[in-house]
Amino acid sequence: MAYILIERDRCKGCQFCVEFCPRNLIKISSSYNKQGYFPAEFDMKNEDQCTGCKTCALMCPDIAIEVYK
């Protein structure tokens, strides 16, 4: 089982991770971070579906995502 951590205050909400996640496990938050952006969030209720492919982390221009297997 894999999961990801997204550093909320580093994320600028570009949505690259949302767009490229093959399992659609990332969404944009409805609350903003310290910088005033709506950051990405990992869908914890479906975390068992994450394969740990790391596509989200590779696409992130802000280096705000860590993937754990």
Image: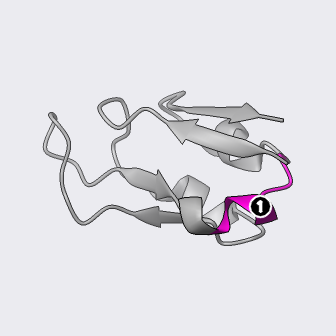
**x%, y% of residue 43?**
54, 63
In the visual, does 54 lie left or right of 57? right
Q: Which residue is mark 1?
A: 48
Residue 63 is covered by the magenta coloring:
no
Kindly indicate the quadrant of the structure image that contains residue 5. Answer: top right
Task: Identify the residue at horizontal 56%, vertical 59% (top origin).
Answer: 44
Question: Is residue 34 visible from the viewing direction of this image?
Answer: yes
The C terminus lies in quadrant: top right
In the visual, does 32 lie left or right of 12? left
Kindly indicate the quadrant of the structure image that contains residue 47. Answer: bottom right
Kindly indicate the quadrant of the structure image that contains residue 29. Answer: bottom left
**x%, y% of residue 50?**
78, 57
**x%, y% of residue 33?**
20, 42
Q: How many marks?
A: 1
Task: Identify the residue at horizontal 18%, vertical 51% (top origin).
Answer: 32
Dot 1: within a 10 Å radius of its alpha carbon, few (fewer than 14), some, or many (20 or more) residues? few
**x%, y% of residue 51?**
86, 54
Above or below 12: residue 24: below
Above or below 35: residue 50: below
In the visual, does 27 lie left or right of 66? left
Q: Which residues are magenta?
A: 46-52
Q: Nearer the viewer, residue 26 or 43?
A: 43
Task: Identify the residue at horizontal 75%, vertical 33% (top origin).
Answer: 68
Q: Secondary structure at mark 1?
A: helix
